[in-house]
Amino acid sequence: MTGRSPHVVTRLLQNWGRGDQAAMDELIPLVYDELHRLAHIYMVRERPGHTLQSSALVNEAYLRLVDARHIEWQDRAHFFAISANVMRRILVEFGRARGAGKRGGKVGKVEFDEGRVPSPEQGADLIALDDALNALAAVDPREAKVAELRFFGGLSAEETAEVLKVSSKTVLRDWEHAKVWLLRELRRSEQQ
């Protein structure tokens, strides 16, 4: 998004949401690199040898976003938050379809350290984490959204705060609580 104002992206998103196809055509080149970065973050956490590649994930997310008619886009951050969620859903669906989420299998502990190399069981971990995030969303939707944006979307505390319209301090507090809650939930599901 070099050289382009976030306001240009917001305007294009809003026009696209009102059905302007030309706005979407102009928008995609502006956001593609960031979408690819998000996809790469997701794919790095997948098991080695995963058959889905970052570009394919971006393309599938693009197809789903194009089909999402009449979204009232708030701004650039809202777009990337929705995009991160769409990519997460694609990977979970892919993992479930491949049978990676068999309960009682080789589900390992999910670390929330973004710098660590993923384990070979990461596909199963993603499904278990998705289940835990859904359970957290039932208890505290904002904490679940913070965890999704920080862990899956790779957003900073400041970017997450912008998306959720809360302070960075609130994001950091929610993130710490969500990590503890999710790890406890994942351990509980491993024992079942």
Image: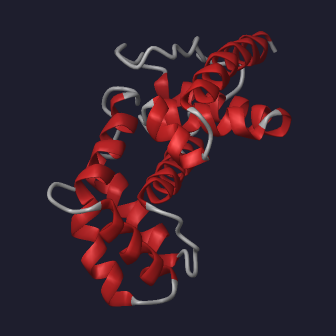
- Could you tell me which residue is drawn at 42 percent across and 70 percent down? 63
Residue 45 lies, in percent from the top left, at: 40, 28
Q: In the figure, residue 107 lies in which quadrant? A: top right
How many numbered discs? 0
Question: Quick check: 7 above or below 45?
Answer: below
Q: Residue furthest right?
A: 139
- Could you tell me which residue is drawn at 60 percent across and 45 percent down? 164
Left or right for 142, reference 39: right
- Could you tell me which residue is drawn at 35 percent across and 44 percent down? 38
Left or right for 31, reference 158: left
Question: Quick check: 49 above or below 109?
Answer: below
Left or right for 26, reference 144: left
Residue 162 lies, in percent from the top left, at: 51, 45
In the rendered image, is residue 133 in sight?
A: yes
Residue placed most toward the observer, 173 or 177: 173
Q: In the figure, residue 191 lies in which quadrant? A: top right
Residue 43 lies, in percent from the top left, at: 35, 36
Left or right for 192, reference 179: right
- Could you tell me which residue is drawn at 61 percent across and 23 percent down? 175
Q: Residue furthest left?
A: 3
